[in-house]
Amino acid sequence: MGHDGRRASGWAALRHERHNGGVLPVLVVNGVTASGKTAAAVEVAQHLGADGVPAEVVNADSMLVYRGMDIGTAKPTLAERGGVPHHLIDILEVTQTASVAAFQRLARAAIADCRNRGVVPIVAGGSALYMRAILDEFEFPGTDPAVRGRLEADLAELGPAVLHARLAELAPQAAAGILPGNGRRIVRALEVIELTGSFSPVLPQAVYAIEDVLQFGLELDRTTMDARIEQRVDRMWQQGFVDEVRGLIPCGLRRGKTASRALGYRQILEYLDGSCTEDEARQATVSGTRRFARKQRGWFRRDPRITWLPAGEAAERIRDAFRLALDPS
RNA sequence: GGCCAGGUAGCUCAGUCGGUAGAGCGUUCGCCUGAAAAGUGAAAGGUCACCGGUUCGAUCCCGGUCCUGGCCA
């Protein structure tokens, strides 16, 4: 009757029932950068596999999508993926611009595809906005390159204050929610107003758009986190991070709007431009990554639906939670 | 031991021709809708090394003490 006593064939049978009768749960592994969430996701998949329940990983990380960006994104190698299929890795060239809305569609499709095949999707990622866009009711107003381009040209020419004033005339409440110096958000607000007639600068409530989501987070104290980040950046340098970046320049890395701004890549590009030393680039990567991790932590902390687990035992605990979801008795 | 430079925010430093001080980074707390590893706002932090003198008033000028770095012996 205890969960440990149930043999793998028992779990497999329950999973089969669940697949035919409804939907399989989605497991979500959140965590700041360098917390070990990628490895934990693979471990969970292997635990479930041992129970006779097939599972696959759906990447929800905005930078693992780029082909060729391997070292600096800590992309799991084939060996590290341990035979577990991964979705949404290496799907874009560095010149292509990633977008939340496109990722939302792809990730939801990947999750649905796993469930249709009777496979448990394990979503792993570090960007809370991406995760919310995937899991929650979250609709993005459209975009238009021509409109966007024109507004961006205006921004460059006139400055954010002028555009903010324009926004204040069209939509006072939207303008009130955006600071006058934040050009990027002002441009987007003006674009959405031009396309749809209105814009709300407020994030929607967190309501799942997908059934049976179990969200977990890897807990890590800040001292450990900072130390791991520094070690990881050092390791990336030893593995040839600078050469990886150099090799991506002919592929158009500098033109990539999102790829060229990835942590480490941006700093190494600056070093290769001669605007700083290699050591300064490495240190800037460490401090930038730390700042990023603090931001991630802030986002995740605000989502009460996440169950936090100590990093060391997360995989087992997630497996147990999954078993309980299959067999509540 | 002598000479020189310096001791100002957690760190690196700026500054005050004498009216109790700033920047960058860091820290903390926020915001975020087709670029989120991005973009952005704010706050907290300092008996200006110590003791004395001059002065209405000293972080600043003067004397001494301690400490750090460099040069000379």
Image (cartoon, coloured by chain):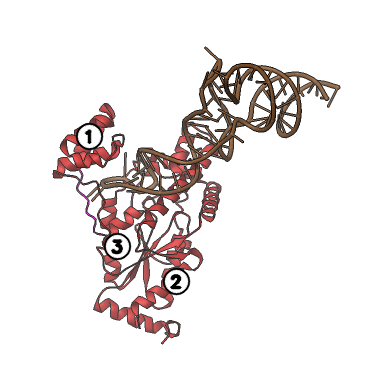
Q: Which residues are magenta?
A: A137-145
Q: What residue sits 22% from the left and 32% below the top? A: A165
Q: What residue sits 36% from the left and 56% below the top? A: A302
Image spot of residue A2 (x, y percent):
43, 85
Image spot of residue B6 (x, y percent):
64, 26
Q: Quadrant of the N terminus of chain A?
A: bottom left
Give whichever of A38, A228 is nearer the camera. A228
Q: Which colour is chain B painted? A: brown
Q: Is residue A68 visible?
A: no
Q: State the red chain.
A: A
Question: Identity of the amino acid at label 3?
Answer: Ala
Question: Identity of the amino acid at label 1?
Answer: Leu
Q: What residue sits 24% from the left and 56% below the top? A: A138
Give whichever of A243, A184 is nearer the camera. A184
Residue A208's place in the image compared with A155, above or below, is below
Secondary structure of residue under mark 3: helix
Residue A288's place in the image compared with A78, above or below, is above
Q: Which mark is residue A110?
A: 3
Pointer 1 residue: A151
Residue A229's place in the image compared with A109, above or below, is above
